[in-house]
């Protein structure tokens, strides 16, 4: 099976670099782009058409919940996997209501996190088929 093409949307440069290194060493993934806020993320997704979007919820300009809502409105089959350090149940519910396929927690242990991303991206592909 081909590698899952991922767009990462997160304003935290250190975390983005950690994820980049982990994605690059895992043959299941191809990190095709990175955006620093939801507005950039929407543009990048429209340009690159990834298999999945890894979306932080807290970012400047356009936050992850709104960006997810806009991406799903434009393409109901879009696969957005949200991730956040928030433990606010209402916010997590908002992310799911916006269309996130899953909401993963930060901070994270890289291998289980990548396994979860792979699993949710696979589930998205099955739903879209």
Image (tube, grey):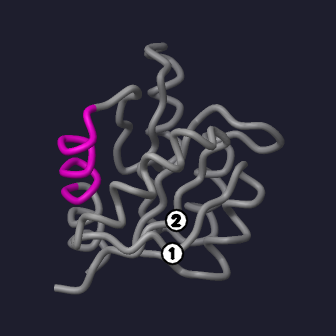
Q: Left or right? Give the position of 73 relative to 50.
A: right
Q: Magenta residues? A: 109-119
Residue 7: image x %, image y %? Answer: 52, 65
Is 127 situated above or below 117? below
Is 73 situated above or below 114? below
Q: Earlier in the sequence, mark 2 or mark 1?
A: 2
Q: To which residue does mark 2 refer?
A: 7
State the SS at label 2: strand
Label 1 near label 2: C-beta < 8 Å? yes
Pick whichever, 77 or 110, lies toward us: 110
**Residue visible at 47% across and 53% down in the picture:** 54
Is 70 situated above or below 48? above
Residue 86: image x %, image y %? Answer: 49, 19
- Outermost residue to the bottom: 2
Q: Quadrant of residue 43?
A: bottom right
Mark 2 → mark 1, Cα distance in angstroms: 6 Å
Q: To which residue does mark 1 refer?
A: 32
How many neighbours does mark 2 have within 10 angstroms: few (below 14), some (14-19), or many (20 or more)?
A: many
Q: Left or right? Give the position of 123 relative to 38.
A: left
| Screen quadrant of the N terminus | bottom left
Residue 128: image x %, image y %? Answer: 31, 75
- Outermost residue to the right: 61
Residue 61: image x %, image y %? Answer: 83, 42
Pick whichever, 114 or 13, lies toward us: 13
**Residue visible at 77% across and 44% down in the picture:** 62
Q: Quadrant of residue 102?
A: top left
**Residue visible at 62% across and 38% down in the picture:** 12
**Main secondary structure type of the part rendered in magenta:** helix
**Residue visible at 47% across and 23% down in the picture:** 85
* Badge number at residue 97: none
Q: Left or right? Give the position of 60 relative to 128.
A: right
**Is residue 43 a member of the stretch shown in magenta?**
no
């Amino acid at each position: 099976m081909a590698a899952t093409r991922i767009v990462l949307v997160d304003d935290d440069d250190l975390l983005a670099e950690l994820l980049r290194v982990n994605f690059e060493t895992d043959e299941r993934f191809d990190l095709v782009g990175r955006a620093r806020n939801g507005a950039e993320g929407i543009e990048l997704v429209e340009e690159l058409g990834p298999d999945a979007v890894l979306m932080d919820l807290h970012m400047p300009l356009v936050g992850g919940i709104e960006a997810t809502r806009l991406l799903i409105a434009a393409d109901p089959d879009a696969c957005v996997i949200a991730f956040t350090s928030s433990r606010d149940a209402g916010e997590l519910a908002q992310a799911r209501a916006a269309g996130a396929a899953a909401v993963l927690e930060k901070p994270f242990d890289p291998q289980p996190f990548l396994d979860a991303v792979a699993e949710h991206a696979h589930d998205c592909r099955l739903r879209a088929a």
